[in-house]
Image (cartoon, grey):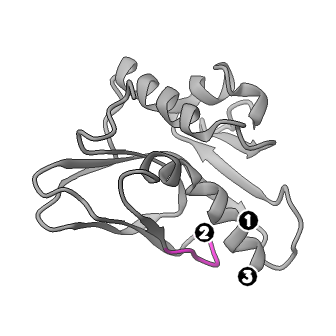
Amino acid sequence: MKNVKKLFSILFTLLIAIMSVVSPVSAVTGTSTTDKGSITIENAVKGEDYSIYQMLKIASFDVDNNREGKVSYIVDNAWYNFFAEGSYASNFDVTNATPSGEHYVILKSVPSDMAQFAKDALAYAKAKKISATSTKTATTTSVEWEKLELGYYLGKFGKQMPVDQ
């Protein structure tokens, strides 16, 4: 369980990096790849749009051992070049396509500047016209996504945190 908590602290660093000055973010963790997760934004601004992008989905992780390097992801095809050929390629090990066309990704090292990583990822999404996995308009001061596939999510939250900030 300790390994799972460590894993998800890394996974949602992207969200926390973007939201640290705007509002708290929480995430629910799981113990298997079939579990579902959730993301909650507190202190949301009513009427503003909040979007999440699933960049990677969990392919497998080891919850029985407390060793690093036991997590593998499958990269969404729209994000392949960002991880395999972009300026963050040294942080991720991306495999050649499997017969089913999937590319597996292993985190080698956490990017040193996660806020910049998030900004670059949002700029990439905009340039490549990648649609958000989900966008919600805040009707209260809390925005929640439930029953999400476990994985690596990027968030764009309201007008307070545009891509160029």
Q: Quadrant of the N terminus?
A: bottom right
Disc 2 element: loop
Question: Which contiguous range is marked in magenta?
Answer: 28-33
Q: Residue at x 69, y 38 (%)?
A: 98
Q: Position of residue 129 (x, y in %)?
A: 33, 23
Give residue 61's mark.
Answer: 1
Distance between mark 3 and mark 1 Cα atoms: 11 Å
Q: Is residue 140 above or below residue 152?
A: below
Compared to residue 131, the image places residue 155 above or below, namely: below
Q: Which mark is residue 141?
A: none
**Quarter in which the C terminus is drawn:** top left
Q: Which residue is mark 2?
A: 33
Q: Contact (CB < 8 A) between labels 1 and 2?
A: yes
* Distance in Å between CA atoms under marks 2 and 3: 14 Å
For label 1, the SS is strand
Camera-side residue of 152 and 6: 6
Please name the residue that numbered disc 3 is placed on: 1
Q: Are marks 2 and 3 in contact (CB under 8 Å)?
A: no
**Residue 31 falls within the magenta-colored stretch:** yes
